[in-house]
Structure formats: structure tokens, C-alpha cells
Image: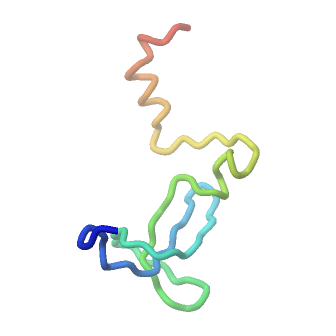
């Protein structure tokens, strides 16, 4: 690996799937202003996820409708005139 191109500030971070509440701890250098207490009693930075392996159809084997922040409506408004009905 090349030297000097990888971040040095890795630490434990909580990743939380907001669609179902699933959380896991992993090392990351992603920045966050929020923190949350983990099962071990320590407080870690919190990264909120829209989708994780617990809610993704590939891993769960079932389709789920996940629309965060009206993305589908934004797409339809932008490209709806070009879509055939």
C-alpha cells in the first residue's frame, strides 16, 4: 500500500440502521457530531444509515419499501414527464 494516503484517525463507531434500529460497532474514520452509549457502557460516535445488511433485500431475501426523504417523489417530479405511462 502507498504510504501517506490512508487516514490515521480510525476509532470505534456505532453504525445504526434507521429503518429497523439495527446497530453494530466497527472501526471507522467517518466524522460524526452525535454520540450514543453502546452495550459495553462506553460512548461512541454515531453514524446513521438508511440501509444495512439487516434491511437490504439481497441479504434478507424479501423486498422492503424504503423511501428516505422523498427520493422517489423527487425522481418522479424530475423525470416524470419523460416516463411513459
Extreme-left residue of the structure: 4
Residue that appears at 46% across and 80% down: 12
- Percent from the top left, x then y, of residue 46? 45, 72
At a point 57% along the width and 60% down the height, the residue shown is 17
What x and y, as percent, mark residue 42?
A: 50, 90
Q: Nearer the viewer, residue 69 or 38?
A: 38
Left or right: residue 79 compared with residue 59: left
The total number of labels drawn is 0
> How are the residues colored?
rainbow
Q: Which quadrant of the figure contains the N terminus?
A: bottom left
Quadrant assignment for the C terminus? top right
Residue 73 position in % (x across, y down): 47, 29
Q: Residue at x 44, y 16 (%)?
A: 80
Of residue 85 and residue 54, the one placed in the foreground of this image is 54
Residue furthest out toward the front: 1
Q: Which residue is located at x 50 percent, y 74 percent? A: 14
Q: Is residue 10 above or below residue 56?
A: below
Amino acid at each position: 500500500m502507498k504510504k501517506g494516503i490512508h487516514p490515521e484517525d480510525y476509532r470505534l463507531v456505532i453504525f445504526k440502521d434507521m429503518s429497523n434500529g439495527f446497530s453494530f460497532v466497527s472501526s471507522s474514520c467517518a466524522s460524526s457530531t452525535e454520540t450514543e452509549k453502546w452495550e459495553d457502557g462506553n460512548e461512541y460516535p454515531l453514524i446513521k444509515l438508511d440501509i444495512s445488511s439487516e434491511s437490504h433485500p439481497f441479504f434478507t431475501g424479501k423486498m422492503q419499501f424504503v423511501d428516505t426523504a422523498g427520493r422517489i417523489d423527487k425522481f418522479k417530479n424530475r423525470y416524470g414527464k419523460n416516463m411513459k405511462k
